[in-house]
Image (spheres, grey):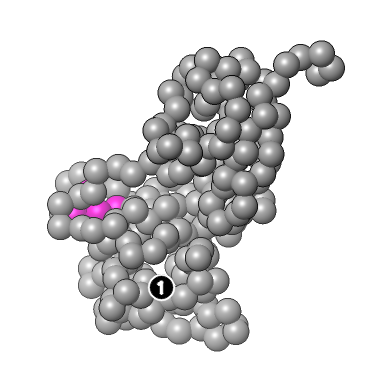
Amino acid sequence: MTGVNRITLQVELPGRQPEEARVLPNLTAMQFIDAILTEFRNEIEHLSDVPARYQLVRSGGTALDDDRPLGDQLREGQVRLVERRPKLPDGTAAPSRPCYLRDLASGTVYPILWLPALIGRSDANLPNNELIAVDLASAPAGRRVSRRHVRLSDVRGQFAVARVPESHANPVNVRRTDGTVEDVAETPVVARHGDVLVLPHSQIELKVLLPV
């Protein structure tokens, strides 16, 4: 709007050079994050549509208050959009590089924040429920996904997938970027950026995103 003062910020998004943004000062940090995701999610495949997964951090490294207006916290300068890092489940470690899976039908992005991790359906009555990183219970055909379906792990610094033994009747495939399809058994198979994990019974397809 003409005549309304704005804050000029340099905003650094994952994997991109800082871009200038002129922001209304009464916008909260969380509202600004929501606007960023709306504008750039189609350009940056691994961006989620869940603002609460992110925070804005000043160039000095301190995080902005999510619920306070930007004008109360900044006058100008550079901020970075960074992912929040939850406490890792016992016995896991952060991946050696950023890892994401994107549902090709819904566009939902699942950050893989720990390894080993599981793809399946959350069930507190089963072991290793805390390892579920991709909960497909709410997917349209999610009931066809085993509760413990795919295990994600780090194999010599590479992102690997394996079928969980209990899901022996529920297959998983890797569709490579060249179109070839590889069945996944209980032995880990390395998945590379752009490959797609296919769960045939549910027709769910999860694209592997390993941004630089």
Q: Identify the element where label 1 is drawn.
A: loop
56 to the left or right of 131: right
Residue segment shown in magenta = 128-132
- Prevailing SS of the magenta stretch: helix
Residue bearing the label numbered 1: 172
Please tell me how crowded label 1 is: few (under 14), some (14-19), or many (20+) other residues with Cα within 10 Å: many
* Percent position of residue 197, x then y: 47, 70
Residue situated in front as seen by the camera: 36 or 161: 36
- Which residue is at the front of the view, 122 or 53? 53
Name the residue nearer the viewer: 70 or 169.
70
Q: Amino acid at mark 1?
A: Val
Residue, x 41% and y 82% (percent of image)? 183
Residue beneath the point at 82% across and 13% down? 3
Q: Where, by quadrant of the figure, is residue 21 drawn?
A: top right
Q: Is residue 99 above or below residue 9?
A: below
Q: Residue drawn 67% across and 29% down?
A: 8
131 in the magenta segment: yes
Q: Is 50 within the magenta?
A: no
Q: Indicate whether 98 appears above or below 40.
A: below
Residue 164 visible within the image: yes
Is residue 108 in view from this perspective?
A: no
Q: Quadrant of the N terminus?
A: top right
**Figure quadrant of residue 45:** bottom right
